[in-house]
Structures are given as C-alpha cells and as structure tokens.
Image (spheres, grey):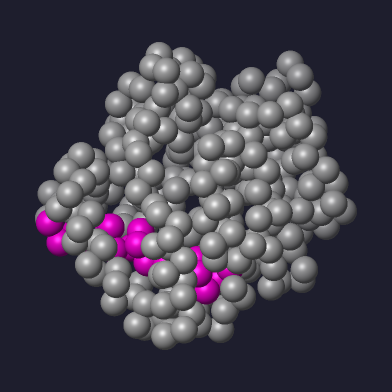
C-alpha cells in the first residue's frame, strides 16, 4: 500500500536530535579497543547501554514501540536493553572493521552471487539499505571480495559527522563518502559507478521537507523518502537491498536481494517504477526487522507524520 505525501515540518526528528558522540571520547575508545582488544573494549558497552536507557526516555519509548511491532508482543525492558546493546556493539565493531581486522569476525554472506552476476558486464550497482545492522561490515566484505569497492551517499551533515568519526578511527576511510545535497553529488556517484563501485544509500530516513511515499511497514503505514529511489532511477543501474545483520558475539549475516533494475527504465515509466521499488523496499525492510528485530537503529517515532 503506497501513496505519495510531502513532509511538512522543517526538519525530521532524527535531524533535530542532538548528536551524542564526542570525538575525544571516541579516540579514547579506539585506543582502548585496539590496545586491549575487542573483549575488553566491549565491557564499556554495557555501561553505555544502561546510561542510554536511563537518560534517553524518548528513544526508549520509540524502541519499545518499534520492538512491539517487530516482535509481535509487548517489548520488555530486557528487549530494550538488547536493542541498544546491539546498536552499541555495531558501532564498536566499526573500530576493527575500518582497521581491516576482519579476522575477528564470523561473517556469512547470502545473495552475493546474484550481485556479482549483475556486475558482470555492467558498470557498478546501487545498494539501498537502512539503519539496520552494520553498513561497515558490508564495506569490509566489499574490500575483501574480488577487489569490490564500496562508496556511500549520505546527507551532507551526516557525512561531516561520519567523516569526523572515520578520521578518529582510520583517516584513509574518508574518501568513500559522497555527501548528498550538492550539485556534484549525482556526478560523483555516476563516476564511482562507472569505475565499478557499489554505491550505497540508506533509504529509511528523510530530511523534513523531502517528498515521501506512505507504505505499509510492520503492519502500520509509515512515510519513506522518494529521493534515494529517484536518484537510483536517474543513475539507471540495478538496485539491491542490503543488510548486514548483527547476530551477537562476533557474528554477522550479510544479505543482498535484487530490489529493482532501472537500467532500461524510460522517463515515462520512471515514477511508477520508483513507487514500486519503494513498496518492495518497505516489504524487505519489514522482513529483516522481523528476522533480526534488535538490528533496526531508528530511535525515534518512525511512524509519525514528520
């Protein structure tokens, strides 16, 4: 079920929410983790998780509402703790993934063959995901499998914060980020695709004034941004859903599924193809949220009219 809408507020809630990261603390965490090891570094996460649950009540309520839909039952306090701990764990694991410590992880990949087949004779492909699990583990696999290169399109403010984070962890990772919201963004994405890159976007958040389409998500209607799919249609490449699910401990499952193929989509067919792709995206996101419910990291009221 889809219908086009347009968001009315000047900024989405996730944009307005203050950033909780601190570069000095992050650098300290990086030093502790790389010096003392992943097991010792993870001990800090339990305190961080408890602090977040106590002092972020609106995020706690949003987590409980989401988990109730994904789990199909009342979400207990322990479910909320596990949700936030999963989020903290994936952030912590970035330290190792961005420093090429793939040996620390047990990573299974599903659907890679179809993705590689799509790249055969085709310049690049688009990966559209969500704030679901870890994108860093996807980039790590891209670097380690047959020389695949992965770049990420992000809103400019997010790109600035992510680049600052990456600089603290591994400065060489900064070049894989393409900021959205600039005239050059589309050209940069096309250039990366022409060079054989996989170009990724996250399509479960929008800025406040972005056009959206209402789709059924976990049994309720929610607004999804149109922009990432319009860009995908304009770039005329095959599109795959991506998810790097965290399963606890050091285990990750990476999933790729074909979502759409805009390579032969004509201008008159574009809007219908975009709407169909968004609906398919919402369906696959629902599937993976139910499969791994503690992996979706949007700690705000996703179903509200922004």
Q: Name the image quarter holding residue 39.
A: bottom left
Q: Name the one closer to the observer, 235 or 264.
A: 235
Q: Which residues are magenta?
A: 77-98
Membership of 93 in magenta stretch: yes
Instruction: Please tell me which residue is depicted at 41% across the width and 33% down the height of the picture.
Output: 15
Q: Is residue 300 above or below residue 273?
A: below
Foreground of the two, 222 or 57: 57
Judge left or right: residue 182 versus residue 303.
Answer: right
Q: Position of residue 10 (x, y in %)?
A: 42, 18
Quadrant of the rendering where the N terminus is positioned:
top left
Asked if residue 119 lies left or right of residue 48, the reply is right
Asked if the magenta segment contains residue 43, the reply would be no
Give the x, y percent position of residue 156.
59, 36
65 or 279, which lies in front? Answer: 65
Q: Is residue 110 above or below residue 101?
A: above
Q: Residue at x 75, y 41 (%)?
A: 189
The residue positioned 13% from the left and 49% from the top of the image is: 74
Residue 40 picture location, percent across and down: 34, 82
Q: Is residue 233 visible?
A: no
| Residue nearest the observer in this picture, 27 or 153 | 27
Residue 198, position in %: x, y? 71, 52
Name the quadrant of the C terminus: top left
**Above or below — where is 67 with respect to 149?**
above
Q: Main secondary structure of the magenta part?
A: helix
Residue that appears at 40% across and 14% down = 8
Res. 35 visible in picture? yes
């Amino acid at each position: 079920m889809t219908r086009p809408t347009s968001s009315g507020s000047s900024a989405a809630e996730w944009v307005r929410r203050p950033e909780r990261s601190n570069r000095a603390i992050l650098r300290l965490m990086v030093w502790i983790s790389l010096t003392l090891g992943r097991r010792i570094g993870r001990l800090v996460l339990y305190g961080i998780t408890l602090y977040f649950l106590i002092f972020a009540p609106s995020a706690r309520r949003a987590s409980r509402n989401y988990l109730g839909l994904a789990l199909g039952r009342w979400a207990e306090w322990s479910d909320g703790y596990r949700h936030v701990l999963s989020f903290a764990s994936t952030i912590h694991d970035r330290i190792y993934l961005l420093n090429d410590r793939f040996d620390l992880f047990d990573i299974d990949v599903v659907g890679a063959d179809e993705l590689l087949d799509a790249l055969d004779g085709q310049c690049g492909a688009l990966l559209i995901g969500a704030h679901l699990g870890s994108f860093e583990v996807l980039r790590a696999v891209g670097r380690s499998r047959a020389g695949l290169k992965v770049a990420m399109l992000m809103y400019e403010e997010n790109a600035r914060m992510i680049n600052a984070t990456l600089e603290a962890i591994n400065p060489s990772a900064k070049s894989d980020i393409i900021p959205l919201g600039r005239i050059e963004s589309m050209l940069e994405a096309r250039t990366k695709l022409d060079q054989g890159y996989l170009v990724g976007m996250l399509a479960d958040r929008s800025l406040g004034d972005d056009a959206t389409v209402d789709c059924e998500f976990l049994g309720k209607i929610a607004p999804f941004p149109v922009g990432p799919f319009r860009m995908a249609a304009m770039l005329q490449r095959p599109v795959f859903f991506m998810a790097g699910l965290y399963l606890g401990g050091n285990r990750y499952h990476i999933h790729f599924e074909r979502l759409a193929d805009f390579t032969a989509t004509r201008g008159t067919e574009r809007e219908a193809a975009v709407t169909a792709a968004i609906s398919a995206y919402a369906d696959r996101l629902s599937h993976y949220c139910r499969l791994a419910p503690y992996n979706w990291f949007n700690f705000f009221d996703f179903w509200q009219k922004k």
